[in-house]
Image (spheres, rainbow, N blue to C red):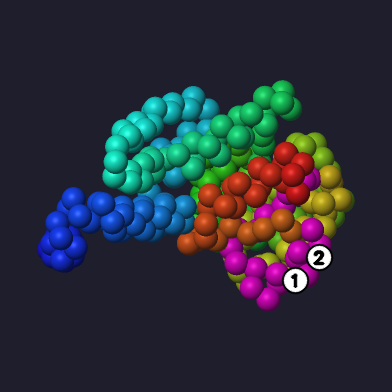
């Protein structure tokens, strides 16, 4: 009703369209929805979450607005940013002649990081990355630099993500990030917010972090840029 009253106050729909007022409100609503989708507050099943890495990408053709005297309404599909990311990842994999691969390094007892592992796994699968978990077999193994570097080197992943509970990171994350970088991995991420650890982790080589509510489109775009040599 509020929108109808607003349109009526503008002199009717034709007048609102002629002024571009209605189009501006539609654009604003579209941008707000896109932000929610990028942060996965609004989920597109099979596109922004719960995608299958091995499934072929199917893209519906966009219908372009018809020309006319009035300014056109914004057009687009909610899935387009994620489709563009998947296409970019597929193109990068084709140039490398191998699928892009992610390795999740578990820190601490498995039950403590299962939720973050699942969240990160589903995120990487959105753009077609194959995902493997390297579980922490003991309380100290993942911080054993030589062991970790051998394990990473034998797998040669494109990206490594540390997954653990917040209380584990202060004593382990920095040394693990250094080991990952020494193993020659282009990008290393942290599941969760680094908080006060941000500066030392970045200095050690951390590329970024993955946290609930973050802009996943921007994060994946930056990650693919790093993997493609753009950063």
In the image, 89 versus 136, the foreground residue is: 89
In the depicted structure, whether residue 221 falls above or below residue 213: above
Per the image, the residue denoted by label 1 is: 199
Image location (x, y in percent) of residue 229: 77, 41
- Give the distance between the C-alpha atoms of the residues marked 1 and 2, in whole angstroms: 6 Å
Image location (x, y in percent) of residue 14: 18, 50
Per the image, the residue denoted by label 2 is: 203
Count neighbours of disc 1 (C-alpha within 10 A) and say few if under 14, some if 14 to 19, many if 20 or more: few
Secondary structure found at label 1 = helix
In the image, 224 versus 185, the foreground residue is: 224
Q: What's drawn in magenta, residue-wise?
A: 185-205
Image location (x, y in percent) of residue 61: 39, 27
Which quadrant of the rendered structure holds the N terminus? bottom left
Q: For the image shown, how many numbered marks are present on the structure? A: 2
Residue farthest to the front, as pictured: 69
Image location (x, y in percent) of residue 85: 55, 39
Q: Say whether residue 132 is left or right of residue 41.
A: right
Count neighbours of disc 2 (C-alpha within 10 A) and say few if under 14, some if 14 to 19, many if 20 or more: few
Q: Was residue 123 drawn as part of the magenta stretch in this picture?
A: no
Q: Is residue 28 visible?
A: yes
In the depicted structure, whether residue 85 falls above or below residue 116: above
Q: Are marks 1 and 2 in contact (CB under 8 Å)?
A: yes
In the depicted structure, whether residue 60 falls above or below residue 191: above
């Amino acid at each position: 009703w509020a929108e109808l009253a607003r349109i009526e106050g503008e002199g009717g729909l034709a007048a609102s369209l002629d002024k571009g007022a209605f189009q501006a409100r539609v654009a604003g609503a579209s941008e707000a929805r896109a932000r929610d989708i990028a942060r996965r507050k609004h989920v597109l099943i099979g596109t922004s979450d719960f995608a299958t890495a091995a499934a072929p990408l199917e893209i519906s053709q966009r219908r372009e607005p018809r020309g006319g005297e009035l300014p056109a309404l914004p057009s687009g599909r909610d899935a387009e940013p994620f489709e563009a990311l998947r296409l970019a990842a597929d193109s990068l994999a084709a140039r490398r002649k191998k699928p892009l691969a992610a390795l999740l390094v578990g820190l601490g007892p498995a039950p403590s990081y299962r939720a973050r592992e699942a969240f990160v796994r589903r995120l990487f699968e959105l753009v077609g990355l194959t995902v493997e978990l390297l579980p922490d077999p003991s309380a100290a193994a993942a911080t054993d630099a030589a062991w970790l570097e051998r394990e990473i080197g034998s797998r040669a992943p494109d990206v490594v993500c540390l997954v653990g509970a917040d209380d584990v990171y202060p004593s382990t994350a920095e040394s693990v990030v250094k080991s990952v970088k020494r193993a020659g991995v282009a990008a290393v991420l942290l599941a969760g917010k680094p908080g006060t650890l941000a500066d030392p982790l970045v200095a050690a080589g951390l590329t970024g972090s993955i946290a609930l509510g973050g802009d996943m489109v921007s994060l994946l775009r930056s990650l693919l840029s790093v993997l493609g040599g753009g950063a």
